[in-house]
Amino acid sequence: MAGGRALLSGPRSWCELLLARRFGIQNEKRNVTLCSQNGRWMTENSLPKRSSQSQDQRSTLSNIAALVGAGAMGMLGLAGFAHADEAEHGLQAPSYPWSHSGWFSSYDHASIRRGHQVYKEVCAACHAMSLVTYRDLIGVAYTEAEVKALASEIEVEDGPNDAGEMFMRPGKPSDHLQAPYANEQAARAANGGAYPPDLSLICKARHNGQNYIFSLLMGYRDAPAGISIAKDVVTYLSWAAEPEADERKLIGAKWILGACIALFQAGYFKRWKWAPYKSRRIIWDVVN
């Protein structure tokens, strides 16, 4: 046959075989006889083969491209999550160096006392703290005598008495902090339909907790001259949400110390127990 025409003993041409080798397609017939343009006869097995080095380079480039693509998609996903979080919770509040936020730090009890005073004189006019009792403040912000005096300032409905009637009595340390409204409907009616939230767990119920509340309190207008109360009331609300935080940190520190001591003892015992086995020499007497 004339030069430049391929003589095929199979169904595939020269170009098909090159494409098959390029894309990794296995040929059905391994011994196809070909004729090149200069008339030289070749078989498929004698075709020039691509080097393994170029294949490794192409594979490496493909992996790098896949990693870059995955990283770009991840960044886009994080950006979308940030936008969704911003739409749901608003702008991220700045972080403030709270004295009780460290691993081994505790609440500022003087600040808790001042914060309770602010809540009592300002916040309690609209917001309740139904999960906090007066006796919770004993040893935290007040003495027992002071707590009894605070509780006695309010009147609580109790009963029924022997006649089956409800009556009013002075407050006791076991009573909860008095709510400003009798029920939710009364609270909404007094605030134009809005319901003032309970502040017992407000630091846990809001995104970024105490930083959000502090930014909210400081975001309306400047405080009056000589008055700074926002930090103390946020500290008080943080304590109300997690009154056991100091005790939990103390227990955690004790466990960490005990675990370190136990780890040291275990390491010493292991070395003492295994030292004779690791340092001994075994000699085989093959003569006797």
Image (cartoon, rainbow, N blue to C red):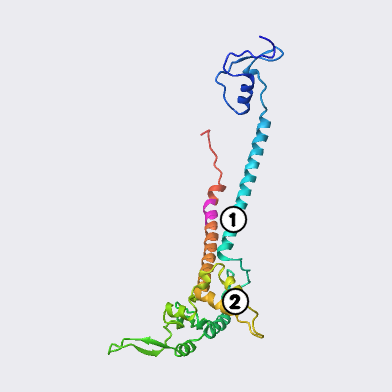
Q: Amino acid at mark 1?
A: Gly
Dot 2 falls on a residue whose secondary structure is: helix
| Residue with the mark numbered 2 | 217
Q: Let me know if residue 272 is in the magenta part.
A: yes
The answer to whether residue 132 is seen in the rendering is no
Dot 1 falls on a residue whose secondary structure is: helix
Q: Tell me: residue 192, above or below residue 25.
A: below
**Residue at left 50%, top 83%?**
125
Q: Position of residue 100 (x, y in %)?
A: 58, 73
Q: Quadrant of residue 172?
A: bottom left
* Alpha carbons under labels 2 and 1: distance apart: 29 Å
| Residue with the mark numbered 1 | 80
The segment highlighted magenta reads 269-274
Q: Quadrant of residue 165?
A: bottom left
**Residue at left 56%, top 83%?**
118
Closer to the camera in the image, 161 or 218: 218
Left or right of 159, for residue 173: right
Identify the mark at residue 195; answer none if there is no mark: none
